[in-house]
Image (cartoon, rainbow, N blue to C red):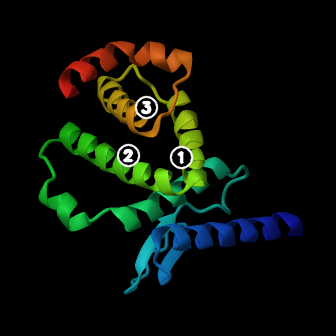
Amino acid sequence: MEKKEDFLENFKTAIISTVKSISNVGDIDVTFGNDNSKSEKKRVNLPDLENSNKINYIKARANADSLALKIRYSNSEILQSYAPKGNISEKLYSIAETVRYETLGSMEFKGVKKNIHNYYIEKLNGIDLDKEENKITEAFENYLRIGLLDLKNQKDIDKKLKPLKKNLDLALK
């Protein structure tokens, strides 16, 4: 059991170092789990890794990378000033911003691109595309990721999203 705890602590230390490096903010709080303590520092709150039997390392790394890139490349004041109204519009706006800063980070950090891509493929396989709202948001996210990050879809995902891709091509081009 000691080895598992040591491995987990080493993994957390690596994640914390990575977040500090990618965000370009040395004085940042990186917490795991529900830590709502007040701090003057910038904060990245990641899911708790200790309370699960099987840790999803791909998700943990991609989440940490994405949040660090958000700190580095996103400005919440500017983002809020242009935020649209409406549930789906807000989601699409948020997706576009996330893909924007992940694209910037992927151009600078090759490992980030790999982490985010691996998690995105895993995420896509678990999404229910039968819900209309999921179809719209996931097709939009997929369209941006394919176009901006040069990612490739699996054939079954391509097949499911093909009709929506045509609509996005018409609307966005």
Which type of secondary structure does the marked residue at label 1 adopt? helix
**Is 132 situated left or right of 103 in this image?**
left
Q: Where's residue 171, x and y in %? A: 19, 24
Q: Residues within 10 Å of mark 3 (few under 14, many from 20)?
A: few
Residue that numbered label 3 is attached to: 146
Residue that numbered label 2 is attached to: 99
Which type of secondary structure does the marked residue at label 3 adopt? helix
The image quadrant where one finds the N terminus is bottom right
The first of marks 1 and 2 along the sequence is 2
The image quadrant where one finds the C terminus is top left
Q: Amino acid at mark 1?
A: Ile
Residue that numbered label 1 is attached to: 116
Q: Residue at x 79, y 65 (%)?
A: 7
**Is 137 situated left or right of 62 in this image?**
left
Which residue is nearer to you in this view: 139 or 99?
99
- Mark 2 touches mark 3? (CB < 8 Å): no
